[in-house]
């Protein structure tokens, strides 16, 4: 059975999924796993297609000190114990920089170009690239594909791509990129099946997870995003503040004497729901708490989603549908209800019963615009991109070799 391996490597975990390639290029998820606790308490966990556990084992810290080691351990497990030998690997790479507006087949030249964007995403890009490099070294014939979080947004108009700063910085790459592009692309591709009437119209998608952003879609294309140069801007997130006056950062530097590394840590790890609530970055815990600070954090989250919806509706010059997705968007009845209540002026009216049963369409029959819940699947998007690049590449290249 031909398979594709999808890898999503972060600083302390490597998530992976294996898809089998069935007739007519259909992909079926067979294995989902992750190696987490890299460099601290390494643990491999994986499950099969029907959720059955395939592995749950701890490793000594010396066995899995870094991301390449985690990739090697997971790869050995897949090859040696499950006899999985993928014909290609698709990687999530957070930053494709200004040039990549679609996935790309990886070679050493591509890796060098992607290394240039490490400074644009210092917490993600190095970890995304580490397994790519080690696979290039150990399995040079194995086709690898990089799929970017930025690519889906690369065709924004100039006004949506710029900051009001001297042009030289834009030329250097200081631009409004936008992220979560694989999630939005998946939703855009799914909408014609879910809601053909609105798929070509003006749609706001709210990706509400630990990371959160919103995207304005016109005819299935991204025209605006709440995120910009980094994945810090826009909505408040689990531990990131979202939109913040840059003057606050100047204050932290000049008045609090924070060095750049502390400011970075603060922005990525100490703010957002966690910072505001002082309790947790996890929406479930905040919803279960009656602490006033937890309530404030949720109020702020809902308020900022509604404010940003207004901004995106302005970018679209109107609105024909609203879509919730990701962990909070797919699961929190209460956040969806509260956000939709704030969108009434845009024509959204909730059907409380449908919302409570987590239906796909949660707006009332009288709602001027439909409101949907569409589960996202970034890994499937990566697998699809990898397969199509592989198939299209076949007219130029020999059939990819199976790696054993
Ligand atoms: P993600 O990053 O997409 O996995 O989303 C993670 C976020 O979704 C966390 O803040 C979780 O608390 C939140 N989440 C997951 N399930 C629920 C739920 N049933 N109710 C509220 N929030 C949830």
Image (tube, rainbow, N blue to C red):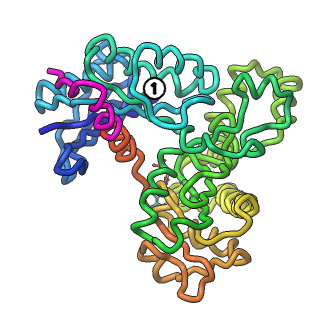
Rendered residue at 73%/58% (across/down)? 315
Secondary structure of the residue carrying tag 1 is: helix
Q: Which residues are magenta?
A: 388-404
Q: Within the image, what quadrant is residue 117 found in? A: top right
Rendered residue at 71%/69% (across/down)? 318
Rendered residue at 45%/29% (across/down)? 10
Q: Within the image, what quadrant is residue 290 found in? A: bottom right
152 relative position to 344: left or right: left
Image vertical order of residue 74 relative to residue 147, above or below: above
Residue 403 position in % (x across, y down): 18, 22
How busy is the neighbourhood of tag 1: few (under 14 within 10 Å), some, or many (20 plus)?
A: many
User: Quarter holding the N terminus?
Assistant: top left
Q: Is residue 250 magenta?
A: no
Residue that carries the numbered disc 1 in the rendered image: 128
Residue 352 position in % (x across, y down): 52, 81
Can residue 299 be seen in the rendering of this structure?
A: no
């Amino acid at each position: 059975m031909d398979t594709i391996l999808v890898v999503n490597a972060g600083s302390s975990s490597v998530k992976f999924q294996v898809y089998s390639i069935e007739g007519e290029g259909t992909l079926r998820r067979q294995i989902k796993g992750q190696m987490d606790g890299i460099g601290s308490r390494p643990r491999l966990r994986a499950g099969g297609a029907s959720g059955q556990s395939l592995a749950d084992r701890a490793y000594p810290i010396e066995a899995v000190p870094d991301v390449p080691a985690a990739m090697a351990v997971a790869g050995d497990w897949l090859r040696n114990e499950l006899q999985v030998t993928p014909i290609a690997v698709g990687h999530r790479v957070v930053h494709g920089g200004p040039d990549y507006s679609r996935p790309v087949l990886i070679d050493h030249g591509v890796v060098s170009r992607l290394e240039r964007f490490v400074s644009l995403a210092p917490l993600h890009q190095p970890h995304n690239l580490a397994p790519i490099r080690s696979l290039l070294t150990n399995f040079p014939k194995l086709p690898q594909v990089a799929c970017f979080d930025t690519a889906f947004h690369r065709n924004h108009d100039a006004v949506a791509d710029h900051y009001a700063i001297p042009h030289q910085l834009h030329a250097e790459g200081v631009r409004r990129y936008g992220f979560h592009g694989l999630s939005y692309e998946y939703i855009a591709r799914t909408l014609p099946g879910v809601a053909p009437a609105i798929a070509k119209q003006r749609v706001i998608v709210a990706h509400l997870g630990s990371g959160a952003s919103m995207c304005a879609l016109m005819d299935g294309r991204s025209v605006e995003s709440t995120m910009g140069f980094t994945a810090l801007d826009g909505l408040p997130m689990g531990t990131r503040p979202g939109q913040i006056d840059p003057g606050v950062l100047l204050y932290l530097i000049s008045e609090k004497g924070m060095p750049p590394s502390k400011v970075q840590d603060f922005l990525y790890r100490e703010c957002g729901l966690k910072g505001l609530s002082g309790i947790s970055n996890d929406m479930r815990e905040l919803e279960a708490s009656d602490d006033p600070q937890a309530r404030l954090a949720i109020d702020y989250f809902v308020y900022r989603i509604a404010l940003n919806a207004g901004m995106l509706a302005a970018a679209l010059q109107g609105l024909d549908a609203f879509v919730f997705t990701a962990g909070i968007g797919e699961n929190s009845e209460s956040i969806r209800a509260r956000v939709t209540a704030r969108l009434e002026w845009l024509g959204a009216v909730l059907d409380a019963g449908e919302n409570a049963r987590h239906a796909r369409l949660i707006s009332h029959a009288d709602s001027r615009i439909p409101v949907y819940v569409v589960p996202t699947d970034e890994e499937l998007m990566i697998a699809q991109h990898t397969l199509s690049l592989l198939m299209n590449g076949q007219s130029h290249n020999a059939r990819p070799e199976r790696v054993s």
